[in-house]
Amino acid sequence: MNAKPFTIGVLTSGGDAPGMNAAIRAVVRSAMAKDAKVLGIANGYEGLVNGEFRSMGARDVGGILQRGGTILQTRRSERFKDPKGQREAIRRMNAAQMDGLIVIGGDGSLRGAQALTAQGIKVIGIPASIDNDIWGSDMAIGVDTALNTIMEAVDKLRDTASSHSRAFLIETMGRNSGYLAVMAGIVCGAELVLMPEVNSTVEEVAHAVEDAYLRGKNHAIVLVAEGANIHTTDLSRMLDEMDVGFHTRVTILGHIQRGGRPTAFDRLLASRMGNKAVELLLNNESNVMVGLQGMGLTPVPLAEVTSHTRPAALAYYEMAKMLAR
Ligand code: ADP
Ligand code: F6P
């Protein structure tokens, strides 16, 4: 009689991030190469609690490498946050004879993964969130694609800003992290960046915009992270009242930052991380997240990931200011 194959569950959770599909594909195909079985879990932890499992083979993950979003669907699940929901999820996993779980998601999803490991479930985490706010990985899946989307949008907005001699306040996502805004500030040559980790005043923004005007620029770009201490639309109103040379317009980029075809960087990162997660599980390692550190992949204990806050990108913030002259 053949031994039961090692069975791996895989889910995507939290905000979707471009490259999640590439990670799912890598998990399925890497597992198949080692004669392990994969159960795809629909709808994140909500599907884990409900037992929404389906067997996945090579053809089920064909044609998804280049697609944004997640074919497994994702949810935020209040039920799973509750210990009762977690108990139900574990019951479902045991019934399906799941030997290990791969969680692809952001910092909240990894806290969920940690809650399961604390109850004896073998879990490997894969960081995926455009916010890049996860401890232990230089980059999460989706960040590079989101940054490229922002860059393309800001380049376009600069054309119209220059044609009308306007200041554009452009709001980026990131929840409490200013990573996307700061990096976009550098790659788009913004006049100023507002990030949640640094308190800014309206006077500072007014000064930067007016200064750009007085130096003869025909536009000013201010990148505002969604979590910044001044709200983008309030800022626009106040700048117009103060008369800073340019009239202002606001663009909130919103969920466009979460969609689209993953960049080569994200496809490669996701493929490597999916492959590594399977390798770790089959080597009987668990309770870690696959982190990108430098060019290499390193297992970082989930307990460490979830008990630390990733430091703000302050050196890049200073650099963005230095280059905006
Ligand atoms: P992200 O993973 O993108 O940060 P969320 O913060 O919304 O997204 O988390 C996704 C899901 O992870 C939540 O809806 C919840 O089901 C689960 N989760 C988050 N925090 C915890 C926690 N402390 N304990 C258990 N599950 C959690
Ligand atoms: O975590 C990813 C993210 O896009 C954040 O940048 C943003 O604050 C949040 O999710 C938006 O969540 P929702 O998709 O529920 O609107």
Image: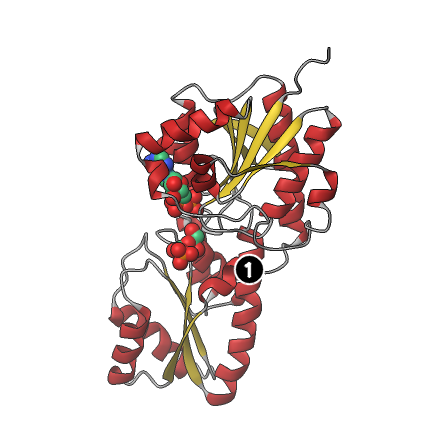
Residue 154 seen in render: yes
**Amino acid type, label 1:** Gly
Q: Work out whether 132 lies above or below 289.
A: below
Question: Closest to the observer: 196 or 126?
Answer: 126
Crowdedness near tag 1: few (<14), some (14–19) or many (≥20) residues, C-alpha within 10 Å: some
Question: Closest to the observer: 195 or 19?
Answer: 19
For the residue labelled by badge 1, is the local secondary structure a helix, a strand or a loop?
A: loop
Q: Left or right: 123 with respect to 214?
A: right
Q: Position of residue 154 (x, y in %)?
A: 52, 71
Extreme bottom residue here? 164
Residue at 69%, 43% (x, y): give it. 60
Quadrant where ligand 1 appears: top left
Q: Position of residue 194 (x, y in %)?
A: 36, 62
The residue singled out by tag 1 in the image is 259
Q: Work out whether 317 lies above or below 244.
A: above
Q: Position of residue 252 (x, y in %)?
A: 41, 70
Q: Left or right: 202 with respect to 262?
A: left
Question: Closest to the observer: 156 or 120?
Answer: 120
Residue at 64%, 25% (x, y): give it. 279
Colour setup of the view: secondary structure
Residue at 33%, 70% (x, y): give it. 232
Q: Position of residue 189 (x, y in %)?
A: 51, 67
Residue 310 seen in render: no
Q: Quadrant of the N terminus?
A: top right
Residue at 52%, 44% (x, y): give it. 140
